[in-house]
Amino acid sequence: MMRLLFFVVLSAILVTGVAGKADAHSKSLSFSDWLWQGAHLKLSFSVPQRDVTLLPSVSARGLAPALATHLNNAITITQGEMICTRQASFTAHPAHSGYLTMRAQFICPSATDDIRISNHAFFNHAPSHVHFAHFRTSADTKRGEEILFTATARSFTLSHKGDSITAANRAVLSTYLYLGITHIISGIDHIAFLLCLLLLATNMRQTIFLITGFTFGHSVTLALAALEIALPNSAVVEAIIGFTIALVAAESILARQHLMKKAGGVVALALLILAIIGGNLPPQAWAGLIIFTL
């Protein structure tokens, strides 16, 4: 009875959350790659096109011009009391599908003094925006220095010593931990899926196993996407998230009635029919859903 009551409450939570935005999977993100060569800094800035639509001047100027103007005003580099000059306005370059990439080059007064990077891009339009920056030199193109810009950490001081770059005031690990926690908590799909898993657990050992498995699997998929080993389709991902939540929620009831095999076959057949008559998902997505269901 308690499990059934828990399932009803969970269903209500899911229904009320359907209309809301899945913030955990639509987080505003941007990326940059910096090459520090003497007094010159080359910058390549990439951001999803959907994030650029947040800028107020997009409707009048278009995506690329609006982004160029925004970056011209949002990114500054200083060296002591001096401002590093930008050689020209940000210009558009080829990018991955669904992204915009802008490039620019800065010249600083000194080739050896520390520089301070200030990045205010998108934070005033999306407070949860996160920017991932990679700084490197021509002699150290693989490792470099990773910096995480957030709404509360928009400026960093960097030193160029030999062939390496170091940041004087970074706290990347703690920031990543904080982002990871908020990523889980802010996503109702995460909470719903974990609660559904708990319905399947009959003891503490299974509970720990299920939660650890979810965390490990989520981390692996995020790593594959970050390393560009896998390039996920966001529409497919969102569809699969909702489907798996429904499937796991149903399993907690169907398993006790010994109906899992029959229900799995019926759902797999329904998915096959949808794929044949022409669903909005690509063939490999339908195949994955059918295999997972079976």
Image: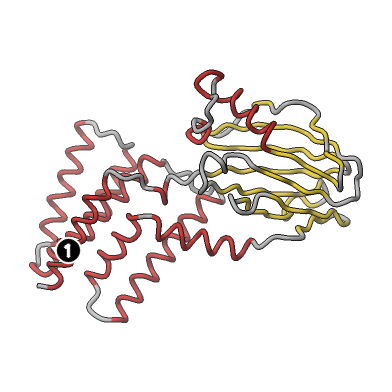
Residue 97 seen in the current view: no
At a point 63% along the width and 31% down the height, the residue shown is: 70
Residue in the foreground of this view, choosing between 73 and 235: 73
Dividing the picture into quarters, in which one does residue 84 lie?
A: top right
At a point 36% along the width and 70% down the height, the residue shown is: 211
Residue 248 seen in the current view: yes
Residue beneath disc 1 = 7
Residue in the foreground of this view, choosing between 272 and 162: 162
- 13 versus 50 height, above or below: below
x and y percentages locating residue 188 in the rendered image: 33, 55
Query: For the N terminus, which image quadrant?
Result: bottom left
| Secondary structure of the residue carrying numbered label 1 | helix
Residue extending farthest top = 60
At a point 81% along the width and 56% down the height, the residue shown is: 164
x and y percentages locating residue 124 in the rendered image: 56, 41
- 280 versus 219 height, above or below: above
Q: Amino acid at mark 1?
A: Phe
Query: For the C terminus, which image quadrant?
Result: bottom left
Residue extending farthest bottom = 204
Say left or right for 188 vs 138: left
Residue in the foreground of this view, choosing between 80 and 129: 80
Dividing the picture into quarters, in which one does residue 109 lie?
A: top right
Say left or right for 44 vs 199: right
Residue density around tag 1, few if under 14, some if 14–19, many if 20 or more, within 10 Å: some
x and y percentages locating residue 218 in the rendered image: 43, 59
At a point 72% along the width and 55% down the height, the residue shown is: 145
- 94 versus 218 height, above or below: above
Asked which colour scheme the image uses, the reply is secondary structure
Count of picture labels: 1
x and y percentages locating residue 138 in the rendered image: 81, 46
